[in-house]
Image: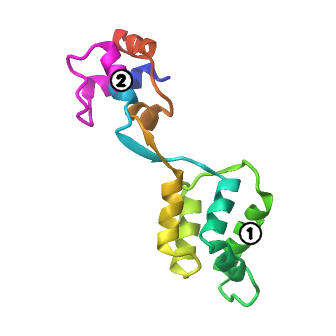
Amino acid sequence: MDHQALKTEIDNDPEGIGYVGKSNSEIVDLLNGSQYTQVLPITVSGLTIWAVGTQEIVDIYDGAQPTNTNKAIRAICMGAMHLFGKSNDEEIDLTDPDVANMIDGLVAAGIVEQANKDALIAMATAPAGRSEILFGQKVNINDVRTAMSL
């Protein structure tokens, strides 16, 4: 935990959460509340379940065939088919710019429907507190005490 960054967050309150005048315990609750959302990595198994459930796997398979003359899109489809064959718990970060661009490319090419892309992102989206957004984890009372003592 970066306690100096936590202290800066509490002192400056850039999101207007309202830390001023709160006890350390109340600050912990404010930081760990679920007022935000974040897109979490999704497992290959989860991606496969999405592709089968939305039937996008069929269009992705078709897009991987040699009859698809758009090599960039065909390569993305071939890579996706390779992932689907793995069916394991390796994770894919949908917020990675390269991954996001590939998915957007499949939507633009008409391989994946926008509504199904939105469903994929929704499936990977979870509630998060300010601490998870900033630090990737929840804070505890000792974190806040240490930060406030700096």
Q: Is 20 in the magenta?
A: yes
User: Label 2's element?
Assistant: helix
Image marks 2 and 1: residues in contact by CB distance under 8 Å: no
Residue 121 % position (x, y): 50, 58
Residue 112 % position (x, y): 56, 75
Look at the image and name its color scheme.
rainbow
Residue that sits furthest to the left in the current view: 21
Left or right: residue 65 compared with residue 37:
right
Residue 144: quadrant of the picture:
top left
Q: Is 16 in the magenta?
A: yes
> What's the distance in space between the residues labelled 2 and 1, CA to CA?
43 Å
Pointer 2 residue: 29
Q: Which of 54 and 17 is in front in this view?
A: 54
Pointer 1 residue: 81
Q: Which label is found at residue 113?
A: none
2 or 1: tag closer to the N-terminus: 2
Residue at the spot 50% in from the left edge and 30% down from the top edge: 137
User: Label 1's element?
Assistant: helix
Residue at the spot 65% in from the left edge and 85% down from the top edge: 70
Q: How crowded is mark 1: few (under 14 residues within 10 Å), some or many (20 or more)?
A: some
Q: Residues within 10 Å of mark 2 (few under 14, many from 20)?
A: some
User: What range of the chain is rendered magenta?
Assistant: 7-29
Residue 21 % position (x, y): 20, 16
Residue 50: quadrant of the picture:
bottom right
